[in-house]
Each structure stands twice: as structure tokens, then as C-alpha cells.
Image (cartoon, grey):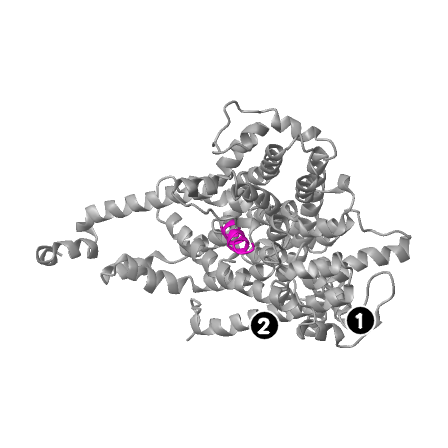
Amino acid sequence: MATTATATPLRSRAATQRGAVPTRLFGRTALYVLAIAGACLFMGPFVFTVGSSLKTVAEIHAFPPTLFPAVPQWQNYVSIFTIPGVPYAIFYRNTIIIAVLVLTGAVTTAAASAYGFARFRWKGRNLFFLVLLSTLVLPEEIVLIPKFLMFNNLPRLLIHRTLIDTWWPLILPSWFGGGAFNVFLLRQFFMQIPRELDEAAVLDGANSFQIFYRILLPLSRPALATVGIFSFLGTWNDFFHPLIYLNTNTKFPLSLGLRYFQQQPADATQPRDHLLMAASLLAIVPAVLLFFSAQRYFVRGIVMSGIKG
Amino acid sequence: MQAGTRAQHKSRRARAENIAGWLWSSPWILGFFIWTLGPMIYSLYLSFTKYSISSAPSWIGWSNFQHALSGADSLFWPSLIRTFTWAVIVVPLSLSGSLLTAILLNQRLKGTPIFRTLFFLPSLTPSVALALLWQWLFQPDFGPINYLLSKAGMVHTPLWLSSQYTAMPSLMIMTLWGAIGGGTMIIFLAGLQGVPSELYEAANMDGAGSLSRFFHVTLPMITPTIFFNLVIGIIGALRTFATAFVATNGGPHYATWFYILHLYNTAFQSFDMGYASALAWIFFVIVIFFTTINVRLSRHWVYYEGEAR
């Protein structure tokens, strides 16, 4: 180390570990600069939108644009709930109901299905696990049309009405294993829980339901939280399915409702872009809150189930 | 005698386990038949028919496929090529962006949890809200981006989403903003943290610099993660829909008319269910094709730890 340092001091600094304090300091600073620049890029649009959502109509259309309003119009966040023809509060309520019902179905049925794959030997298990893996890369668009027709035509035959323009098509499918990805993730997680725990419980006279409920589920909280978050965010963000299945605006979730709001011909004397910004921001809040309250579990769930590769 | 009863006992247990396994996994298995396999077969049948919901499907053989592939549907090939172009540009940018971001967050900088949070926030934005937010940022007359550009000396600021020439790049910017710090980045982070530190120590002993450590240790060790994200990323890019639908609705002049947009319009605006099913099957074949190629190629560049080579 010493010899190289005397011969070519500059290169040695980069090449060696200990003698490189100035270079490392420079490197660290560059990394911080990068991180801060990245944070600005990612947060900039949000900051501007927050500012816009608090402006008056005149301010939002002013040029040059300002970042923040002269006087924050907090009442914008109240006004969005009383826009004529746009039932924003109902969109909000609808999204929560749909997302919670989907989440409940996905978590319970995915956990049960994963338990079957992880802990029992049954004929066809390996085949079905292969099928499950291949459906992971199956584009959903392939079943879109037949599913729509099923929800339209089958109920007409059976109960003499269509299930189009109801929440059934959005909720019901999630009660069947909640998607291959969720089953896969939970199965991987269950496999890592030592079987000795099950066997000890069997000796104590536990049946398969008790093993599932008392041993596997409590130990799988990170994975269950991950599935729950994925499912909730997926429903919260879903635009395609509501777009296809729903027609009545009082049944819309937020995603579809926001677009409905955007497309409603605004009164020419009363532009409401500032309210649209407020409405969009408010639609992000629950997703953000949920994610950060469960973030700890979420990252652990991904790492421990081994989907990293 | 005793051996016989034991064998009997064992087979009875195996049968009980078989039934229990089927029962536990039945939600997903049933779901697979009801929501995946059944609809796929039905959609395959429909793709050979003319069907507009109002009247029963009538068999027309290969006509739907001919209509698409021959170019008689003048939107088919352009939308397919547009979607490919989109994937070819967006996937490498978002993957390398996510990887670089993950590396940055893996440098043990102070405040890493805060940076991770800030980077992740955009990906929590529902696609509709994301589209509305960026429509405003890109607003050609009084939006902040053009304001900054004009302040920087640009005379003819772009029309962004309102011009057929810049609509596609605008959508790319929006999408990358929402994608780079998101799930892909988290999965990369998990992969990076899974690289054994002994390998880095060994590389240090050999006097490897940070770049050489990256290319000879980090990169090979995370190839499985890259592969996973690549497969998921390509499928996701080909399926792009909601942001384009809300921000530009395929325009201007079909500049952002992606394949799934075409499928959606055929199925749910024109209610041409037979032809739309053919479009869905063509899409399905394309996705399977790319995924298979990916898996084949992966043998040459993905390194699995513990695998005999």
C-alpha cells in the first residue's frame, strides 16, 4: 500500500481502502447529492400538486405558475365533497367497501390454498403447482371478455338479472384463492416454517384446522400483511375492471370516479381544476397511510418468501 | 400381520391427507377452473365467431384472425408496433433506473428510510390520479414544466400530451416516474441485500475497486432478481392501459393507441366480442412467446447459487 502511494498517489487513493479518505468523502457526498436530487424528482410533482390543490381558480390558471398559493384555500378539500353531480364521498366509501371485501377474500382463501400446497401430499399437487406458477405470467386480458359475458349472461339465466353494474364481478373472483401470486407467496412462506411445530401440535391432538389457525397464521403475519397490502392497493388502484363492469356513478370507486369528475363538463364560469387536484391527492392518502403503517412487514414478507429471485 | 395393519393405517392416513390437501387448496383450484381455464376456452371459441352480445355467436372460422393480421383492421399493426416500441424503451429504462435507485439505497446513507419512502411514494399513486396530476404538470400554456423550460430559454415549448409527436414520450416520463422507485426497486433491494458479504470481503482482499466489485460480484449475484423483474416488466409494459386511457385516450391521432386500448374499444365500445376475443388470443400468444424466449435466454445469463454448472 505504502509503495503504490508514493509511486502514484492519485491512483492509489482510488484503488486502496484505507488511504482513500478524501476520495471516499467525495464519493459519499456525491451519493447524498444523488439521493437528494432523486428525492426532488420524485417529490416535485407531489409538491406542485399540493400547492395547486390549495389555490383559487384564478391562481391555478395564472402564468407564470406559482408553487404555493398566496392564501391556502383549505376549503377546497371540503368543497370536493359537495360538487354537484360528482358524489366524491360515495366514491370514497365504495372504494373502501370493495377493497376491504376483496382483501378479506384474498387473504383468507389464499392462505387456505397455500396451506394445502405447503403441508399436504395430494394427487395432482405438483401438477397444480406448476399450473399455478404458469398463471403468474398469464395476462388477465385473455379472460376479460368471457368473464364479462359470464357476469352478464349466466345470472340472466339463473336469477333473471345481470350482474353487470354491480360489485359482484369486482369482489367474487378474489374469494377463489385471491390470485396465483398470493397463493405462491404464502406457500413459500409456510414452507419455511419448521414442520416440527405441526408435528408437535399433532401429538397434542390438534387437527389440520387448528394447526393452520394456531400455528401457521400467527407465524405468517409479515406474509399475510404483504398479501393484504398487495390486494388492497391492487383494488384501490384498479381502473380497468370498474371501467368495464360499472355504469352508474353512485357505484363507482375512486379510480373511475376521478375520471368521471374529469370528464364532467364543468360550468364554464366555474372551472374546477384545483378541486380535481385536491380530489386526486385525497385518493392517494389511504394507500400511502396503509403502506407506511405496514411497511416493516411488507419488506420482510418479500425478503422471507424469497421472491427476490 | 402387524406390518399389514401398519400399511393399512398408513394408506388410510395418506388418503385422509389427500382429501384434506384437495379441500384446503380447493378455493384456488376451483377458481382456476371458473375464472381462468373455463373463460380461456370460451374465449378461444368466441375468437372464431362473430358475436355482438345482442345475437348469438355465429362461427366464422379464421376470419377474425385474418381481419387482424392482414391489416384489414387498420389499427391492429400500428397499435401492436406502438406497444412493442413502448416496451423496448420503457422496460430497460425502468429496470436500470430501479436498479440504480436500489443500489443508491443500499449504500448505508444516513436517512435511507426517508429516501426509500420518498422514492416509493409515486408508485403508490393510482394510475388515474397519476394521469390527472401529470396532465396538469404538462399543461402546455401555464403548466410548471413548460414554465421552467421557457425560463431556461426554450422558445417553442413542447405541447406534451396534446401533440401526437410528444404524447408518447410524455406518457413514458409519467410511467417511469411512477415505476422506478416502486415494487421493482424494492425487489432489487431485497436481491442486493441477499448478496453474501463474504463475497465482497473476498473481492476487497483481491483489491477490487467498487466498479469491479459491482460488475463481478453484485451483478452476477442478482441476475435471478433481474430476470424476475425483466419478465414481469415486459408483461406489464405490453399490458399498458390505464394511464394512456385517462391521459390521452389513445390520441392525439392514435399516437398512444396501445394494443390493450384497441382491445378495450373493440370489446366494450363496439361490442365486437368475437373479434376482441381474437385480439386477446393474439395478445396471449405474444406474451407467452416473449416469456418463453426470456426463460430460454435466461439459461445463458442467470446465475443460481448452489446450482451445478
Please identify the quadrant where the N terminus of chain A is shown: bottom left
In the drawing, what numbered circle is on residue B61?
none
Label 1 or label 2, whichever comes before in sequence order = 1
Label 1 vs label 2: CA separation? 25 Å
The kind of residue tagged 2 is Phe
Q: Position of residue B70 (x, y in %)?
A: 67, 75
Q: Residues within 10 Å of mark 2 (few under 14, many from 20)?
A: few
Which portion, as a residue range, is magenta?
Answer: B164-176
Is disc 1 in the same subunit as disc 2? Answer: yes
| Subunit under mark 1 | B
Magenta region includes residue B166: yes
> Which callout, 1 or 2, points to the residue nearer the camera?
1
Q: Residue at x 73, y 54 (%)?
A: A173
Label 2: element kind:
helix
Q: Looking at the image, which is closer to me, A51 or B290?
A: A51
The kind of residue tagged 1 is Thr
By secondary structure, the bulk of the magenta-drawn segment is best described as: helix
- Res. B125 image quadrant: top right
| Subunit under mark 2 | B
Res B117 visible = no
What residue is disc 1 on? B49
Magenta region includes residue B71: no
Q: Looking at the image, which is closer to me, B11 or A297?
A: A297
In the picture as drawn, the residue positioned furthest to the front comes out as B155
Q: Position of residue A229 (x, y in %)?
A: 59, 46
